[in-house]
Amino acid sequence: MKKNWLLLLTVFVLMLLIAACGGSDEEEGNEEASADEGSETEETEGDGSGDLEDFAEGSDEDSAQTLRISIGVNDKHPEYEGAMKFKELVEEQTDDFNVEVYHSGQIADDRAAVEMLQLGSLEITIPSTSPMVNFVPEYGVFDLPFTMPSAEVADQVLDGEFGDKMMGLLEDQGLVGLAWWENGFRNLTNDAKSVESIDDLDGLKIRTMENDIHLDAWEEMGANPTPMAFTELFSAMQQGTVDGQENPYPTIELENYYEVQDYLSGTNHVYTPFIFLMDKNLWDSFDEEQQTLLKEAAVEAGEFNRQRSREVAEESLENLKEDMEFSEISDEEMERFREAVEPVIEKHKDSIGADIVDEYLAEIEKYE
């Protein structure tokens, strides 16, 4: 009996040893998998960009409010640089916020991102003012063609009382505007012919944003405008669905449009701001100190964005000239462009708000 008991005890001990060895191998395998996942996370954080998986899952940091920023342009654009500057300014001053930047329309295009703000499913977006017309009709004033003479005048207008007034119109849409940034002057490209005069636009299929003022302006100038989402544009030009498009020089270069477009024209037909937007319900949940910090960071990052936008615009134009045929527009032809779009300004004056249009043009004239 005693021998049987010792035998059973020996077998039991051996089974425990075998189980322990097997469990150790499994734990080591799990540790290796965790290390791989950790490496990927560190790489994303080091780059500073958000990851779509992170966006879906949300932040794991219980102590910090995650502020996710969605922009449509890629991670080489001055807007992305500005967004990263905002992240740096905020996170070096407080542990209250964790900022994630999602570029290249990973989350949504400009209009959809604004709608996400209204629904509370996104914290920040920095759209062009053009799609904002769908939410605040008065923002159509920024789309009036051939009205803004220079970036310096634009700064004066946007940073003054008129800019503050336009910010105030956002509240009824559940939005808060913190700062004006810069998209820049829009210029024309196409893959059909050199455009040096308004006559050269005849029949060209030009992609525009879903914006009635842009559509009407290009029709008055003789082109065939085609509204299309920004994210669909490159393939549309590549496939010949449209002949060309209009965007600031940095966007044209950084989106590689020169690969599918041969001609570039310095039309400077519209100056387009970016506007830094936040979900108003979220904004109202912050205390005064937090609001001041975020506001100041958005303004400072916007100043940085403007500076970089202008530097990059000059650099981009020189780079684009190496791959595209560039056409200057003479003063005489520029006047013909302005005359052609005068009916567009009159047509949309009432829908924008006659008082807004008159105030905008008066502000430009004052600073010009």
Image (cartoon, grey):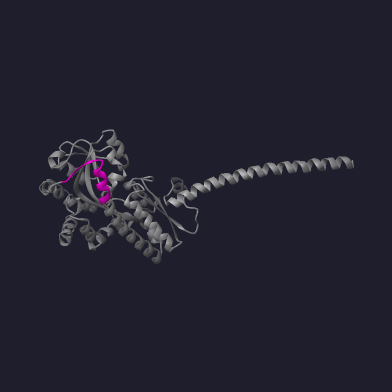
Position above or below: 317 against 240: below
Could one spot residue 248 in this view of the protein?
A: no
The image quadrant where one finds the N terminus is top right
As drawn, is 171 to the left or to the right of 10? Answer: left
Could one spot residue 144 in this view of the protein?
A: yes
Write down the quadrant of residue 288 in the picture.
Answer: bottom left
Residue drawn at point x = 17 percent, y = 50 percent: 146
Residue drawn at point x = 36 percent, y = 61 percent: 297
Looking at this view, name the residue that lies furthest to the front. 322
Could you say where residue 183 lies in the image, as x and y percent from the top left?
27, 51
Foreground of the two, 39 or 137: 39
As drawn, is 263 to the left or to the right of 16? Answer: left
Could you say where residue 114 lies in the image, as x and y percent from the top left?
33, 50
- Is 271 inside the magenta-drawn segment? no
Foreground of the two, 178 or 133: 178
What are the residue bounds of the magenta stretch? 314-328
Could you say where residue 262 lies in the image, as x and y percent from the top left?
23, 38
Could you say where residue 285 lies in the image, as x and y percent from the top left?
41, 61
